[in-house]
Structure formats: C-alpha cells, structure tokens
Amino acid sequence: MPLQPFSEDQILDRLRFENPWWLTGAVENYYTSMTRRMYFELFKPVVSDTDIRRAVVLMGPRRVGKTVMLYHTIDHLLESGHNPLKIAFVSIETPIYNNMALEHMFALCRKASGQNDPKGWFVFFDEIQYLKDWEVHLKSLVDSYPNTRFIVSGSAAAALKYKSNESGAGRFTDFMLPPLTFHEYIHLKQLDMLITESNLSWNGGLQKIFSTHNIHELNQHFINYINYGGYPEVIFSEKIQNNPGRYIRSDIVDKVLLRDLPGLYGVRDVQELNSLFTAIAYNSGGEISLEELSKNAGIQKNTIKRYLEYLEAAFLIRVVHKISNKPKHFQRATHFKIYLTNPSLRSALFSPLHVTDAAMGNMVETAIFSQWMHRAWFTPYYARWAKGEVDMVKLNNRNFTIDWAMEIKWSNHFYDKPGDLKSLLQFLRDNELKTALITTIDKSASKILDDIKLVYIPAAVYAYTVGRNTILLLQGNEN
C-alpha cells in the first residue's frame, strides 16, 4: 500500500496551530514569560531593518535559545504594531513539512492566514538545516520577494555557516548566538544585585571593571555556571542539573557528533570523532600536539586535523595557539591548547565539579577563555617557552608586540606571594610591559612589585566583566 501524502488542509491546520497570533494577536505566555537573552537587543534591529534586502541566518550550538529568541522577536514585532496575520513561524523539522520547498511553505502561510499579498511579511523558518539545499531555496526567496523579510535558524552551526558563506554571499546576514556568558547567567537568574562597579583599573581589553559585595555567593554561582551554565533551559531546571549527561550529552553533543558533522563532512568513523572529542573535553585547557593526539587516539594526524576543524566549526571547541616570550621571533608552533567553548560540556560528559577538584583550575581557565570567544574580532594566545608560561596574552598583529598579559588562577597563592609569578614577571620584562592581571578565588587589589603593577581580580568577577563588556561593545555603548 503506497504511503499517503499529507493533505493541504492538514498542512494549513498545522500552520494555524504554529501561529496562534493569527487568532489571538499575541505570542503564547510560555515564551513571553522567559527572560530575553542579552543578545536579543542585538538581534532585534538585524531583523527589523527591512531596508537591507537580505535574509537573516540565526545560527548557534544546540539549546542556546535560538527558537525562544525567534518567538521573542515575533513578540517585539507584535508590540510594535505589525500585522499579526503577516508574521509566520514554520518549524522545518516538523514531519508534515518534509522536503517541502520554502516558497511553497510561504504560499501556504499566506493561504492559511488569508493575507495573499506577499509584501510586508516577516517569515521565520526554524531548524532550517532539516531542509536539503536550504540555502538555494532561501536565496531564491530573497530574490523573488524583495519586500518580505525571511529569518531562518538552525542548530547545525557548522553546516549553516559553511553553506551561508558558499551560497548566500550578498543575500544572507549571519548572526551567531553563542552559549551563555557568565554575565548573561547572572542576568537571567536575576542576580544583578550581586554586582557593583570596581575602583580597580586595568586596560587589558576591559572598558569597565566590576566587583561584588558578596564574592562567596558569586563564586557559588560561578561554579554552577561552569557545571551547568551554558544553556538557558538547564540553569532553571534542577531535574536536568541532577542528570546533565542525559540531557546535554544526548541532546546536544551526540546529535552534533553523530548526525550534524557526519552529514556535512562525510565522517565515516563517528566513534573515532566521539572518542577524540571526549578526550579533548576531559583535558580542556591542556596543551597538546597533533603528534600526541595521534599517538594517544590511534588516529592519523591529518584526520585529527580535519576533526579539529569540524569541531571548531560546530562551535564545540576553540584551538588557541602558542607564542614565545619574544613573539617577534616567531617559530613554527607544534603545540597548542584546546578549550571547550562552553565549560558545562565537560560536566555533562563526566560529572559536575566541586570547588576543590583538581580539574577546577583548567575549567576556570576554560570558562574565562569562553567569555572572550564571544568577541569574533579577538584572537587569544598563550605564551610558552623553555622556562615559563603565561595563560593569556593579546598579540598586536600589526607589529607582533604584546598589548597585555594575564594569569588565570583559581587560587589566592599568588596574591599572598606575588614574587612566585616568575614566568609572568619575566614575560612582562621581556616585552616591556608595566602591568598585568591575575585572577584569584576571592581577592581584589593592586600591588606594585619591581615597578610592575599587578592587578588581582576574583575569577568569577573577571568572567562577568568580560561578558558584560562584550555586550556593551557589541551594542556600541563603549568605544
């Protein structure tokens, strides 16, 4: 017996179900009751600017809140007085739309809402990666309907970025929604009262430095952020936090490693890719080489190199390269560090960390690096040479000088004994720098040692500060 296709009436009913504002004029309270991510204020004008004849491609890792942001955008359009009958939301992963062309979906939206004129619409296609050749369909829509705004989202960030760049030149505007920063975590949890402005000063890429009147409570939230904080849904659910592996590993990691990346790049041995990522996650923040990875994993170096590129494109990891203590004398770097883009991935794969666990140092470093990863224009490095190492440095790419340097510590030891910062102090002298930043557990102060200013900030405060300054910079509120 041949399979019966869905009837047009069934599809129209589904569209009306997915777009309740056609009847009520409002988005469901389930979505509007959720606090908007800080990135919403950046995304909103990208969608609303209809003078630019482009589709908007909202991409990002799984479960960072893309679908919710689309509903918040629809809510904003309704609040702004836009005709609710000319706003359509279509979830492409719904089986009833299987392999249906985007143009046909748009035509059915107009039929279902009774608004046949294609001008003045805002059309949202969620989980676009489930449609084969979506980029060709979307480009055709942009060309065919210049007075309609098309917005698509998808979780296969690597695939979306690749196809958007290949086929959407001049037609698509990309918007990356990353995992939560610690600043956003504090904001969503309504804990902003913990934060105050600091009287410390340091020029290492921070327009403002913040402080807290309760560092012990902030540290508790920082540890929770490291364990669970990358995903909006997780930070509000004790049930998920009690079993993060089941939720995050199966719904986020496995779908990327077992479906998204193999589908895009033709990875044949998914177990090999999964084993490599597991090893990277466990050792996030550690220095490694292709030679060592190849030997330990039993995978050829060229294959590992490709896998690292895939994992980085999927926004699961970030490779950070090494410089020497005298970066003008560049040498071919055979070693590098790999960081998770979201520290809670490690807890999901293994187990949540406690404050005294040996891995906390590396995961605090991972958390701080992940805050900087939200700045697409910023490339972090670390320094390592025969006699020392510095955790993070900013390299001036114009003249290969060092703009600033810092040490990321989950300890008060170097606050009590600044003279033990031998590697950092040597690096500062070698590069004629007069100041550096060191993170601590709970100490804040500035100290002068041999004419060098050392600025100490708790790691949690520093992570918050980087995230908050990033939003200010992206919003154009700071220079």
Image (spheres, helix red, strand yellow):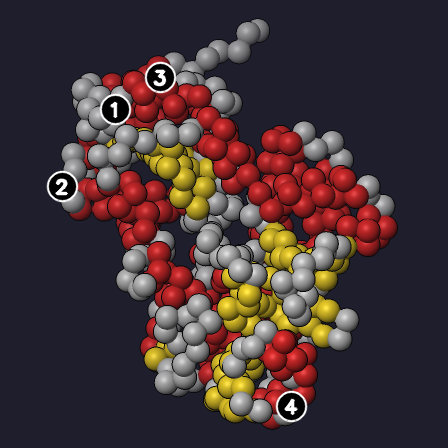
Amino acid type, residue under disc 4 in the picture? Gly
- Residue beneath disc 2: 81
Q: Quadrant of residue 90?
A: top left
Q: Circles 3 and 4: CB distance less than 8 Å?
A: no
Left or right: 342, with 103 as reference point? right
Relative depth, front residue between 460 and 373: 373
Earlier residue among tags 2 and 1 = 2
- Residue beneath disc 1: 146
Relative depth, front residue between 206 and 155: 206
Q: Between marks 4 and 1, how big is the CA–CA gap?
A: 64 Å
Relative depth, front residue between 5 and 477: 477
> Residue sitting at 63 percent across and 53 percent down?
319
Which label lies toward us, 4 or 2?
Answer: 4
- Residue beneath disc 4: 419
Q: Circles 3 and 2: CB distance less than 8 Å?
A: no
Crowding around mark 3 (Cα neighbors within 10 Å: few <14, some 14 to 19, many 20+) is few
Q: Circles 4 and 1: CB distance less than 8 Å?
A: no
- Residue beneath disc 3: 104
Element assignment for label 2:
loop
How many labels were placed on the picture? Answer: 4
